[in-house]
Amino acid sequence: MGATRHAAEGDAADFIHRLQTVLNRVELDCNCRQSLSEAIDRFTALERRRVSRRNLIQARAHKDRIIAMMTFLSELDQITEGENDRTVFEEMALLFVEIAVCANAGAAALRAVDQEI
């Protein structure tokens, strides 16, 4: 899902760049060219905000997942080294791994908030 989303963002950036290239080659009067350039700039700004908003929403979703996993991880306080069900240690270890995965994905989403499209 993340790779698809990054591809879509790249497609939008490529589209904007291709559109600007084509329109720069078209013979337009100065007023029309200026209006068109301003419209493309507004579209680019709106697209940047849309992508930033989506990345921020993703980061918040990862934070929520981490909070949910922390609830399960809090059970670690009740477990002792004498636990009869030894699989509980692997389950807790997997929670740590999943928290790390979510934290990395959340960090990547936050870093992408200010990236240019």
Image (cartoon, grey):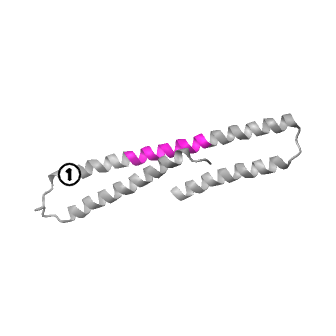
Q: What is the x, y in percent for residue 33? A: 83, 39
**For residue 60, which quarter of the picture?**
top left
The residue lying at 57 percent from left, 47 percent from top is: 115
> What residue range appears in magenta?
48-63
Which residue was labeled with disc 1?
Answer: 75
Q: Main secondary structure of the magenta part?
A: helix
The residue lying at 30 percent from left, 61 percent from top is: 94
Q: What is the x, y in percent for residue 84? A: 12, 64
Q: Of helix, strand and loop, which one carries label 1?
A: helix
Q: Residues within 10 Å of mark 1 (few under 14, many from 20)?
A: few
Say whether residue 57 is magenta.
Answer: yes
The residue lying at 80 percent from left, 50 percent from top is: 22
Residue 34 against residue 68 in the figure, above or below: above
Say whether residue 54 is magenta.
Answer: yes
29 vs 47, left or right, is right
Residue 49 against residue 103 in the figure, above or below: above
48 vs 97, left or right, is right
Residue 60 appears in the rendering: yes
Residue 1 appears in the rendering: no
Q: What is the x, y in percent for residue 6? A: 57, 55
Query: The residue under label 1 is which amino acid type?
Result: Glu
